[in-house]
Image (cartoon, rainbow, N blue to C red):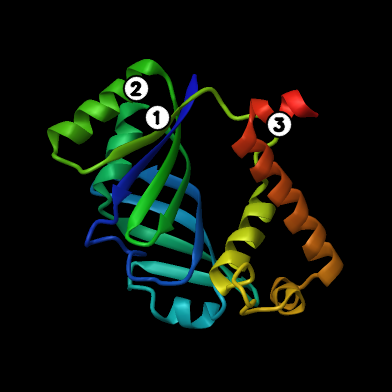
Amino acid sequence: MFEAQIRTPIPSSCALGTLREIIMRVEGITKMKEGVRGVFRVKARDIKKILSDLPSQCEGVVVSPHEAKVFVKEHTCLVAHFIIDSGCVISNAEIQGRDIFWSIVCDDESFLKLVRDLEKEGVDFEILYKGKPESSSKTTYREEEILQMALMRGYFDFPKKVKLEELAEEFGIAPSTLSEIMRRGERKILESYFGSRFEQEK
């Protein structure tokens, strides 16, 4: 068993491909006869506008001021079809810009089948990672969620475009709690980046 991450362009027919300035995580995808259906967690500054822009095959429910769950009832996603048919398991899918980053769990046989199917259909893809499951030092969803939103909103810009207190208000937590989560996530990212060099110098 190993994990892999694959980048593919967003298909022109993607139900969520037109949405902008969102953080999206997949919670579940299943195959249907003519397509796939899935549940996604979406975060955005104006979540009500995001939901109003959803296509007809999507249904969204607000779960917090800046978060919603979106149910895609039917969608013809060729890549998702190939992943499921190959025997690989989709653990996450994230939209960034005009790309989708698929995180999958698989074995050698299912991974090779997936690669062959993508190549046969002429799908543009890039294998970004293939290896053993990452250690527990990986950032949690909450840490990544907050750090990504902070980056998108310009918290790390100079000068800052958004204050810590404003971000904390969006997430509904105290500024001190937000700061602690951010520092914890930043530390994990730095440890992952410096790898063994960091461990040797500790």
The answer to whether residue 116 is left or right of residue 141 is: left
Element class at badge 2: helix
Question: Which amino acid type is shown beneath numbered disc 2?
Answer: Ser
State the mark number for residue 110. Answer: 2
Read off the residue under disc 3.
Answer: 198
Give the image location of residue 176, x and y in percent.
86, 66
Quadrant of the image containing the C terminus? top right
Say if mark 1 contacts mark 3, CB within 8 Å.
no
Can you tell which quarter of the image residue 97 is in? bottom left
User: Residue shown at 39%/67% (left/top)?
Assistant: 58
Read off the residue under disc 1.
Answer: 88
Q: Nearer the viewer, residue 125 or 179?
A: 179
Give the image location of residue 155, x and y in percent.
64, 71
User: Residue shown at 46%/76% (left/top)?
Assistant: 51
Question: Which amino acid type is shown beneath numbered disc 3?
Answer: Phe
Give the image location of residue 41, x and y in percent.
54, 60
User: Residue shown at 70%/33% (left/top)?
Assistant: 136
